[in-house]
Amino acid sequence: LQRLKYHPGFPNGDQLMCPVFLQDKIKYLRTLEPYNMCNATYMVERPRSSTHDIRFSKVEKDRIVAFLYNCSDEECGWVVKPPFVTCGTHFKMFQCQTKLLGHLEKFFTDDIHCIFPYTMIQPCMQNRREYKVIYIPSKQTQYIVPCGHGTSFSSKPHTRLFEFVRRAVDVFREHCPHAITDGLFRVDVFQTKLGNLVVNEFESLDAVYYCGGRDKSFHVTNFLREHWLKHLTEIDIIQDLIVKSTFEAIKEDLPTPIKNTRKKRERH
């Protein structure tokens, strides 16, 4: 990423530090925390250890247990998930605090290459229904990809849900002005037991956006095609290739010149 910082393509510069692009989940969730717009989240940092066997100090264990105690309103246990991954990789659910603590120590012990500097604990939602809202800020376009089992908490025209998504993205953009939000942006939303909407995750760039409504998916596909074509054609090397390919195409369309074979025949 450091080498890419000064390249002329996209993304570049400070965009490479966008927490959604990096899937650094705790960073973008913390921009929403002061506004109570995300699920309660505790960051468990990798303990410093001189041995391969990772163990938490009593102080850290007490902090984790305090969070578990204070965030049990949903009465469904807790979920542990690391950053930098998608599709539920290393995603674990727990009802027992002791087993959760044991999992955390094993998780960091097994991570022998120190890929994960932290992992996160969140209360598991009683209502597992999740709305994945596709949002294109530049076009003010939104629609829903339904997901998960549970009780529906939004219905057409989804005014409350869409307004919440707009506010969440606005807050994120305000606190992360270098974030990549000019293209596809997906906001995954849960509803708490108390009826509050909370952001579960942000996704961008390669977020899944297909849904039952073909017209909406087709609209997003067309937008993305134009979006990426614009970014690609701004890159110098791509511009050179376009010019070269255009020139080659013109050459192919030109009539083939008639070769003068008279002199050759006279020689023979």
Image (cartoon, grey):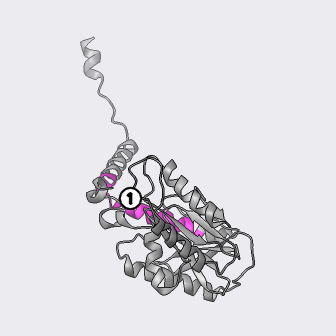
Q: Residue at x 65, y 63 (%)?
A: 93
Q: What percent of the width, then of the height, locates residue 216?
A: 63, 72
User: In the rendered structure, which amino acid carries the disc numbered 1?
Assistant: Leu
Q: What percent of the width, then of the height, locates residue 64?
A: 52, 70
Secondary structure of residue under mark 1? helix
State left or right for residue 137 relative to residue 193: left
Q: Is residue 261 above or below residue 29?
A: above
Quarter of the picture holding the N terminus: bottom left
Q: Residue at x 60, y 77 (%)?
A: 69
Look at the image and tell me whether residue 87 can be seen.
Answer: no
Residue at image mark 1? 232
Q: Is residue 229 above or below residue 266?
A: below
**Front one among 268 and 205:** 205
Look at the image and tell me whether residue 60 can be seen.
Answer: yes
**Front one among 124 and 209:** 124
Is residue 234 located in the magenta-colored stretch of the structure?
yes
Q: What percent of the width, then of the height, locates residue 38?
A: 53, 79
Residues shaded magenta? 219-239
Quarter assignment of residue 96: bottom right
Q: Residue at x 61, y 88 (%)?
A: 160
Q: Residue at x 49, y 50 (%)?
A: 109
**Front one among 268 and 194:** 194
Is residue 44 located in the magenta-colored stretch of the structure?
no
Q: Is residue 43 above or below residue 56?
A: below
